[in-house]
Structure formats: C-alpha cells, structure tokens
Image (cartoon, rainbow, N blue to C red):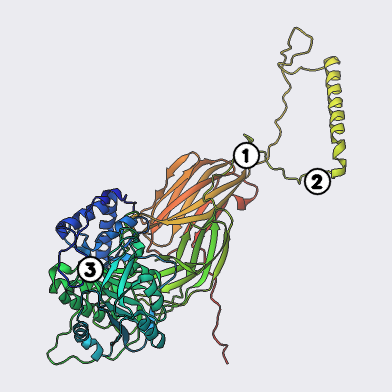
Amino acid sequence: MPFVPPEPLGGLPAVRLGVRGERRLKADAPSPPSPKEFGADLFRALFNDKALAILRTSQYVAAKRQRGLRLRIRFADATALANLPWELLYDPERHWYPCQLSRFPTLRFVDLPEPVLPLRVTGPLRMLVVISSPSDLPALEVEREWTLLRDELDPLVQSGRLELELLPVASLEDVRETLMHRDFHIFHYIGHGGSDEDTGEGHLAFTGPDGRQRRVTGSQLGVMLSNSPIRLAVLNSCEGGHVSDVDPYASTAIALVEQGIPAVVAMQFQITDAAATAFSRTLYDSVTAGRPVDLAVTLARQAVLAASEGEWATPVLYLRAVDGVLFDLEARPEAPPEPGATVPAAALPAATVPAATVPAATVPAVALPVARPAERAAPAPGPPAQPQHVRAEVVDGVVNLMWRQPPDHSVPVRAWEVWRNGVRHAIVTLPMALDDTPGPGEYSYSVVALGDDEMRSPHSQTCTTYVTKPVRNAAPVSPPSPRPVPRRAEPAPPSPPPARRKSRAGWILLLLAIVAGFGAWSLMRPSSGPVETGTVIPHSSETTTSKKAVVPPPVQPPPEADLSVAYSHRQQVLGSEELELVFAVKNGGPDDSDGIVVTVDSAQPGMLRSAKVASPGGESSCTLNADGTSATCEIARQPAKTELTVRVTMSSAAAAPVEVTAESSTSDPHDDNNADTYTFPPPAPELPDTSPPNS
C-alpha cells in the first residue's frame, strides 16, 4: 500500500472520551470532539485515494471468501502519531468502527525480530493478580477490586480453565520471588500508572517497603516477568496504555512487549469498574477458550459497549505475535451446561495477517481464514507435514525459493513461513518465495507449514545458498564491434610461447615488405588482361575503366545464434490474486537471431491470463488462445548478446506447470542452439522409498 505522509494527521487534536474514572493521576484536557467526528477525520487522513482503493479490494476479497481482515498498526516511522487513539478509527462510508467488529480486529503491532510461538499448556491457565494501593496515592479498595475480579472469573475457575492467585503485597520484590517459584501465564495489574513529565517514560505505581509508591518502569517490570512463561499482561491503570509525547517507546505497555511479553492490554483512558469487569470477563473467557488475543479483545470491546457505551475504545492491544495465538491449549473436558442454559455462539475471528505500518507505510491486512463458529473446537488431527526439498536459485542477486509439501498428508496447509538465518522473513500462500533484499553473502533458509487450526509443522531442512551479485536485472553490455565476428569451424591455432613474442614484430615487417614488393612488380609489368574497374595508377593522369573478370564470392559460414531460456523472478500483481512470472530469453551469439517464436504452454485451462515480450526494439504483445492454455509471441530479430524479457501472468491458484519455449529460424549448425525450453516450477526430485522390503 502506498506511503501516507504524516502531515495530514499532524493537525488532529488529542481526544478524550470524558468518562469519569477512579484511578486517574492527572486532569484531562478540555472538551474534545465527538469520537465519531474524530474517527472519521482520522480515517480520511489515513486512507487516501489509492490506499482506500486497496482497502476496499481487501475487504471485498475477505467477504467473498468469508474470512476476517486484521488491521495492524506500526509507529516505527511516525512516532509522533502513536499518541492518537487509533481504536476510534471510523469508516464514514460504511458507518462503522472497525475495531468493534470481530471480522476487522484492530491492534498496535510491535515488530521485533524474535519469533513468538504459542505456548503449549496442559491444564488451566494461571493468572497472577497484583493490586497496588500505595499510601501516598488515592486509595484503592483492594478487597473490593479482588472480589469483583474473582466473582467475574469464577465460572472459568470452576470449569478448570483458569487459576487465580492474588499477590499479598504489591511490591516488585514479591513479584520477583513469586515468579521464581511458580509459573504463570497471565499477569493482571490493578493500580495507578503515569509517565515522567521530563523523560516521558511510563511507569506503574507499586508499593515500596515504606508503603509509599515505588515507580516501576515497563522495562524493569519486563525483566521480572521474564522469569515466567507469561504470554499476556493486562494493565488496568488509567495511563498504562497512554503513549508519551516525548518517547513513544517509553510507554509501559510497549516497553513490556519489547522485553519479551507477546501481548499487552492497557488502558489509554480512565475506565470505570463496570467497564473493567465486563472487559476482563469476556477477555479471559475468550483467551482460555484458545481464541487469538486480538479477537478476544474485540469481543471484550463489545461487552464494554453493552455495559458502558462510552468506554469501548479505552483498551489498547499491543501485540508482537503475528497470528495472535498465545497458547496451544490441549483439549479439556467440557462441563455439561445446566438445564435451560443457553450456549452462546462464537464470533468469526480473523487469523494471521502481515503487519501494516501507519501512517508512514500503511498496508491493509491480508484476508486469511476465520475460525469455525463453535464455542469449543474439536482437537485437530495434528500439525501439517514438514515441507520437503527446499531449493534455492539465485538470479542477479535475487533468491528464488521453491519446496514441496507431501501430498498424502491429511492436514491442509493454508500458508508457509519462510525463515532466513533463523528469523522469519515472509508468509506466502504458494510453495515458492522471492527474496530480493539480501546483499552478497551466505544465507540459510527453512520453511514452516501453517494449518487452518494455527498448528505449525517442524522446520524443513535448511537450504544454504550464496549471493554474489547485489544488482538485480543488470543491463547487458554490448560488444564494441558493430558486427560480430563469425566463429570458424576449425580450432584456433595455439598461441605462440611467450619467449618468441619478441620476434613477432620482425616477421610482420618482413611480410609487409614482401607484399609491397609484389604489388609494385604487378603494377610495372605489362598488362596481359583486364584491369580492375576504378583502379588509379600512381603518377598517371588517366584511369582505366575496362571490365573486371567475374570472381565468385567467398563462401560464408552459416550464421550461429545460441538461444537459451532462464527463469528470472516472480511477483504478485498488486490488488489481485494473479501471479506474474518473468523469464529471460538470451541470444548468446555470436550472430543475430531471426524469426524468433516464443510459446507459453500449460495443461490447465484458464491458467494463462496474458503474456508479453520486452525486447531491445520495444514491447510486443502475444496471442492467447481461447481456453487460456497457450500463448504465442513473435519477434522478428534479436541481436547477438542481448536478452528478451517474457512476462507471463497466471492465476495464483493454478498448480499446473508452465513451459516457455524460444525457437529461432536461424540455421545454426548445432540443432540444440536453435531452441530451448524452461519448465516452471522445475520438477522436484523423487522422494526416496522408505518402505521396508517385502519379507
């Protein structure tokens, strides 16, 4: 998606919802605009004409496939805009807030190189609850806060999905000691929060040894939480999610994510107890059911909207897990519903999408599958099979990767993760990938298959390749001679030894003297035959014009032009599902090639969409047959040592191979040089037979 300049967004005012809370440390700004007006202005400034067109296309594709669409926002290139409440984004044409809808979850993405894998948990998820009320800050009713949270989550505790533990003393030292002796999966903080006025660094108000507040930064707390496999932290503080104007990464929530917590939920506005309890109840009910955390937050927003209409945009989700899945929960026995109870239906969540940078680089989320509408999904048969036969081909500094997925495995594959040097590089939906970013060096690649149920296969075997050319598609260098020199059939004479090179000039002078002497003798001898037309005799005032004897022209060797077809790279067509394959037809020379015909063949009807050829003489279109299985391109002449570019547009859903053949009418003595064929993708090697021999 195109870059969106930050200037149109710079004038947007800060906004507050004006909901009175009990744990706000500082007074709010004066009366704000309405959330809908602010959200509409934010939407129009963010999605310009081209960006809006791509967003509408993504929404159409997602609706057609009955899949969700996730919008992830990064602020690495526009830190000043991280202070805006992006959860209020309002689409004035569709008349909705995207983050209120479960099919359009909106989150703030923190892009870090380390991958986040779901944590396999057997039994209930364990939550550590910290309620801090220092003596020098407005008092909190600790018992009341604990009772409200425990009563709301009691059904999850009774069903065996969640365990709660309250820390008796809300000090940082007690947090460290507790996490060293027992593993927890969720950290829930209730208390005061704020930010330093000078540095802008966010902090939480823990209780010190003297009972007064001890300001603990997000980085300090993140170090303590790293002693336990915590995947989710919830900060129920009035400024815990508010990003500073000085340094956006000083916010407590972002600092926790940078310290290794995959997901942090914080409050960017003050929140009432009714809204906080409704949010916590729905959030933890969804997380303990195995739903992605961004879907869980969206469902919790809807619960807040039902309980307190003006506070649904208060929670903010900061996430670094790509697919939002935090836990790999093993199947638990379901408690039977009570007589007359109604079992609610689950919403349709969005799954894995690539990140979008807003507003410096805004990319709409790619539509991927949604979960089935069931309260508790049946256990999956297992992860997808391990990808096999990962191959790498380097063309002009671009690495083209291809691999195979065993076809006999029962678990379907919806996408593949491509890992480069131990770091996730890309997510693709076809068994091929393009890496055009590396410079010269050695690179190792592996592939992980992703299933519909968010399960992952083991990494494939590592494929190592070397990149030596940093420039892609470098222009060919033409020879300085205007006419190529034909090759001779006989082998070239060997070069004289170096010791005799000093006498070569003498031999040449002697040969020239002999030729000059013979020419002078032939001019002085009497003429016994016709003289060549137009020959001027030295020191003579007249020119002879008699006819010349007919001499047959020398026999010229046949022209030779070596054709070859090679695969260059592939790329996705912007705004569609089509895939463009680029091939190179090279004439190795030494002569020009005439009457070139390039054919593109496929066995699957409707696979080919278009084909065109770009040559030194310009670009020419090709003829496509009616059923979309073949295309023919004709090129009158291709000079020696030049390259033609063949671009083939095909359906990305097609699996049949494509054959590109280039054939020339030039009569090369070697038949193999007149034509060449390239099949894409190249055939994979046969799998070894591992079955035991018959006894």
Of the image marks 3 and 2, the number of the one nearer the N terminus: 3
The residue where tag 2 is placed is 494
Q: Type of residue at label 2?
A: Pro
The Cα atoms of the two marked residues, 3 and 2, are separated by: 92 Å
* Along the viewing direction, whichever of 231 and 250 lies nearer the viewer: 250
Determine whether the residue tagged by mark 2 lies in a helix, strand or loop.
loop
Which disc is residue 368 wearing?
none
648 displayed left or right of 493: left
Q: CA distance from mark 1 to mark 2?
A: 24 Å
Find out whether the residues at labels 1 and 2 contact each other: C-beta distance under 8 Å.
no
Q: Which residue is mark 3?
A: 25
Closer to the camera, 148 or 93? 148
Q: Residue most toward the front?
A: 210
Q: Residues within 10 Å of mark 1 (few under 14, many from 20)?
A: few
Q: Is residue 444 left or right of residue 338?
A: right
Number of dots carrying numbers: 3
Is residue 270 rendered to the left or right of residue 223?
A: left
Q: Which mark is residue 479?
A: 1
Q: Nearer the viewer, mark 3 or mark 2?
A: 3
**Residue 7 image position (x, y, % from top left):** 29, 48
Quarter of the image where the C terminus is located: bottom right
Q: Work out whether residue 280 can be spotted.
A: yes
How far apart in space, not on screen, are marks 3 and 1 (Cα)? Answer: 76 Å
Give the percent coordinates (x, y) of residue 440: 57, 57
Above or below residue 479? Residue 359 is below
> In front: 64, or 426?
426
**Residue name at image x 57 percent, y 88 percent:** 693
Which comes before the other along the chain, label 3 or label 1? 3
Name the amino acid, label 1.
Pro
**Vertical side of 99 occupied by 42: above or below:** above
